[in-house]
Amino acid sequence: MSRSTDSQDPRRRVARFAMARRALLIAALPACLPQGAARAEGLTLGGTGMAIAIIRLLLEEQRQLGLGQPATVLNSLGSAGGLAALRAGRIDVALVGRPLTAAEQAQGLAATTFATNPLAFATHEDTPADGITTAELADALGGEMTSWPGGGPLRLIRRDRTEGDWILLASLSPEIAQAVDRAHARPGLATAGTDQENAELLERIPGSFGIISVGQVMAERRRVKLLPLDGVPPTAQAMAAGRYRLSRALTAVTRGDSGAAAGFVAFLTSPPAQAVLRAHGYLPVPATGA
């Protein structure tokens, strides 16, 4: 029986390197950034990779309206990394793709959830597939389905067990949770360390199959095919109607005593920001308009 180790599987090494690189990025940030609205260099934001592109678009919209200030959006730190950098005073706004825990709330952090977004099952744009069923999903994760019904190999793009999309995926049903466990036990799968690496693998690998935020696809203009699940398209409209239940919320988190980020957080729930969010597949929170 063969064993898959990091030395034998370069894709695992790539994923572990990506997570180590994220930790180094946090450590490399200035240890003591000045606080307050008068800070010359403006805002620094960081966190979940799926929020990076839409936040940059929102900052640009704010700037064009004459309401913004200089801002830097860091490459993917992950939700936990963003919160760690925020607590250390190294960024002003953490971009988080999950609710805060009770312990995090007790630390005096202020959280504003400003949008929800469908998570979609995606594949290479040339894959001969128009959708996937829940039964096929379980088989694709567990390794029982290795070819697309329309032809060609199905190549699963895996994420770490602690990654939010895959945690949510496992909550769909006990059968899917078991299939997720089998997926993590399978040797030789391509494993993405960040949301951007996940998108790049889905774009690049023929027959790829994975999960991704619809908003990330639209904001980053990713060339992938989004698949309906059991005939239901992964859209904000289907999600709002209760027909599509796989989604993530985006939350902006600041320190309770921070004034520098207040203007941007307020802008996130304004009509201009909500128009940008809707144009990129998000459902604003609170939702206004059709």
Image (tube, grey):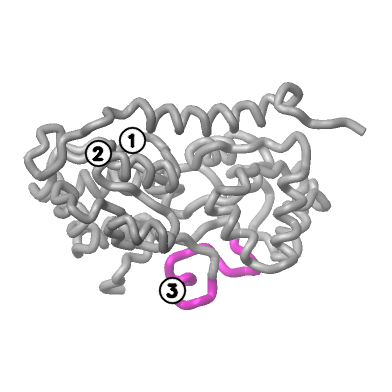
Residue nearest the viewer, comparing 4 with 122: 4
Residue 163, placed above or below residue 179:
above
Inspect this view and state whether residue 26 appears: yes
Judged from this view, the residue extending furthest toward the bottom is 241
Q: Which mark is residue 44?
A: 2
- The amino acid type found where label 1 is placed reads Leu
Residue drawn at (28%, 57%) of the image: 108
In the shown orientation, is residue 266 left or right of residue 151?
left
Q: Give the residue at mark 1.
A: 74
- The amino acid type found where label 2 is placed reads Thr
Q: Give the residue at mark 3.
A: 240
Residue nearest the viewer, comparing 202 with 94: 94
Residue 232 drawn in magenta: yes
Contact between labelled residues 1 and 2, with CB atoms less than 8 Å apart: yes
Give coordinates of residue 7: x percent, y percent: 72, 22
Residue 148 drawn in magenta: no
Q: Earlier in the sequence, mark 3 or mark 2?
A: 2
Under circle 1, the secondary element is: loop
Circle 1 Cα neighbour tier, 10 Å, few/some/many (<14 / 14–19 / ≥20): some
Q: Earlier in the sequence, mark 2 or mark 1?
A: 2
Q: Which residues are magenta?
A: 228-244
Give coordinates of residue 124: x percent, y percent: 61, 43
Inspect this view and state whether residue 278 appears: no
